[in-house]
Image (spheres, grey):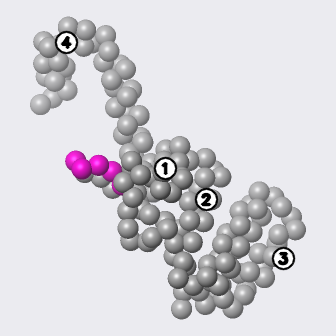
Amino acid sequence: MTEAHFNLLQLDQRPDWYDHLDQVALAMADEQETWALRRDYGWEGDDGGTWGPNPLEPDTCVLDVDWEDTLGLPFPEDFKASDSYVYELMLVIGKYKNDPAVMAHMVALCAADYLGNLGEPTLGVIRGQLRNSYIVQHAND
C-alpha cells in the first residue's frame, strides 16, 4: 500500500486526518530516531517488547519496563555525556564481577579516564600507573 493510498483510507475514517498528518509524521520520525539510538546501544525488540543489554550480567537482557527500576539508568535516548560514562562503568563491573581485584582496578581506570577527559591535569600519573599495572594488563588473560 502506498503512502497516498493509506492517507486516503485514513481520510475516509477520520475526516480531520490531514489536520494532524504533520504531527503524526513528526511523532513517527521521533520514534524511529529513538529506536535507532537504542539499537546503537545493543537494544533489540519484537512484538513482545523491547529490551537492552544488562551491563551487570553480560549476555542477559533487561526489558524496557524494568530498565530504569532495575539498573537506575536513563534510556539511551535520554543519555547525556556523563551518562555514557556510567553505562561504560556498569559494563566494566558486569564483565569483571567475578574477580573483585580486577574489577576494582578497571573501575578506578575508568574513573581516572573520565576525570582526565574532564581536564583534571593531575590524573595523568594515576592513569599511567593503572594502565601499566599487572592486573589491568592481564585482566583478559
What residue is pinned by disc 1? 68
Structural crowding at the residue carrying mark 1, measured as other residues with C-alpha within 10 Å and reported as few (<14), some (14–19) or many (≥20): few
Sequence-first tag of 3 and 4: 4
Looking at the rendering, the stretch of residues picked out in magenta corresponds to 47-51
Sequence-first tag of 1 and 3: 1
Q: Which mark is residue 125?
A: 3
Residue 39 visible in the shown view? no
Image quadrant holding the C terminus, namely: bottom right
Image quadrant holding the N terminus, namely: top left
Sequence-first tag of 1 and 2: 1
Inter-mark Cα distance, 4 to 2:
46 Å
What residue is pinned by disc 4? 14
Structural crowding at the residue carrying mark 2, measured as other residues with C-alpha within 10 Å and reported as few (<14), some (14–19) or many (≥20): some
Discs 3/2, front? 2
Specify the amino acid type for callout 3.
Val
What residue is pinned by disc 2? 86
